[in-house]
Image (cartoon, rainbow, N blue to C red):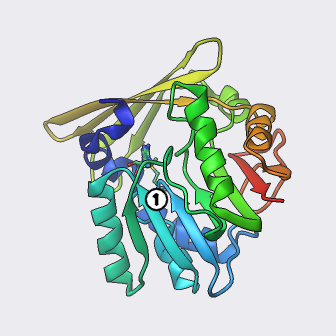
Amino acid sequence: MDWYEDDDLWVGFADVMFPPRRVAEAEHLVATSPLLKVAAGDRVLDLACGPGTHVVPLARRGAVVTGVDLSEAMLARARDACERAGTTARLVRADMRDHVEPGGYDLVVNMYTSFGYFVEPGENLAVLRNAHASLVPGGRLLVDVMGKEVFAGWVGRPQAVDVEGGGTVFMRDTVLDDWTRLRSDWTYVRGDEVRRTSTYCVLYSAAELRALFREAGFAEVECFGDFDGSPYDNHARRLIVRGTRG
Ligand SMILES: C[S@@+](CC[C@H](N)C(=O)[O-])C[C@H]1O[C@@H](n2cnc3c(N)ncnc32)[C@H](O)[C@@H]1O
């Protein structure tokens, strides 16, 4: 089993990755970000939707949302979140390497470093090709990752973060394969309980990810450094790449 297929990882570290604070943040982003602006009736696909972090606020704004995730446990959480919020969304268990709905969407989003999980470069490209095929002409794909340039600014710093609801997570990052991939080792300590896991992803520079979008067929490709649409420069917090289907 590859690391990202392990439901125990996503469930065991859900308090760390998906704390209540992120629900409020996602609500704020969807309400204010020019990159996440949707009109009522827009068809939106959230690829690797997790526990519905962005599915709920997008659906609340009138978008017709489909959330796709490989983890049944995450989809169950997304279903609960929709129910609690009184919103509806179609939730589908699928692998983002395979999921295609030709011409089905105005917007596809892939949020919070849910891209670059696959060692085989063709498989990451397949995700972008599928997203491209799933868009209407003029439709957009938004991928939000930690850019290589941003990461280079804080690599090596030991990180210990208190988790909402209790416990502390210690994170240690290791750059692999000449700055092409990153391993993050997570240790979550809560009372007597200690959980450990490792996640891996490709570290893309803006130029590398932009080239991959082009290879996948996107006519126009833009990079941003935050959800307010600011440039990807030395102040960037994230690498957000937006591709428009021609
Ligand atoms: C870091 S979480 C992000 C979740 C959500 N986008 C958010 O912003 O909270 C990554 C998600 O990707 C999902 N995932 C991992 N591999 C996948 C795959 N091959 N196909 C679809 N989803 C996958 C995981 O189950 C997990 O829910």
The answer to whether 185 appears left or right of 230 in the picture is left
Is any atom of residue 140 visible in this view?
A: yes
Q: Say which of 52 and 230 sits in front.
A: 52
What residue lies at 75% left-to-right and 54% top-to-bottom? 242
Of all residues, the one furthest to the left in this rendering is 192
Q: Is residue 168 above or below residue 205?
A: below
Front residue (pair 117, 169): 117
Q: Nearer the viewer, residue 96 or 192?
A: 96
Q: Quadrant of the N terminus?
A: top left
| Between 186 and 217, the one nearer to me in the picture | 217
- Residue at left 65%, top 18%? 179
Image quadrant in which you'd find residue 44 = bottom right
Within the image, what quadrant is residue 185 found in?
top left
Residue shown at the point (75%, 43%) measured from the top left: 213
Q: Where is 228 relative to 27, above or below? A: above
Is the shortest distance between ligand 1 and the CB of mark 1 under 8 Å?
A: yes
The crowd level at tag 1 (other Cα within 10 Å; few <14, some 14-19, many 20+) is: many
| Residue 165 in view | no
Mark 1: amino acid: Cys
Image quadrant where one finds the C terminus: bottom right
Residue drawn where x is 73% and y is 37% of the image: 212
Q: Which residue in the rendered view is the most extreme toward the front?
A: 102
Measuring from the top left, give residue 161's x and y in whole percent.
Answer: 42, 41
Residue receiving disc 1: 49
SS at mark 1 in the image: loop
Q: Position of residue 137 (x, y in %)?
A: 78, 66
> Which residue is the extreme one toward the top?
178
- The picture quadrant where one finds residue 206 is top right
On screen, residue 221 above or below 120: below
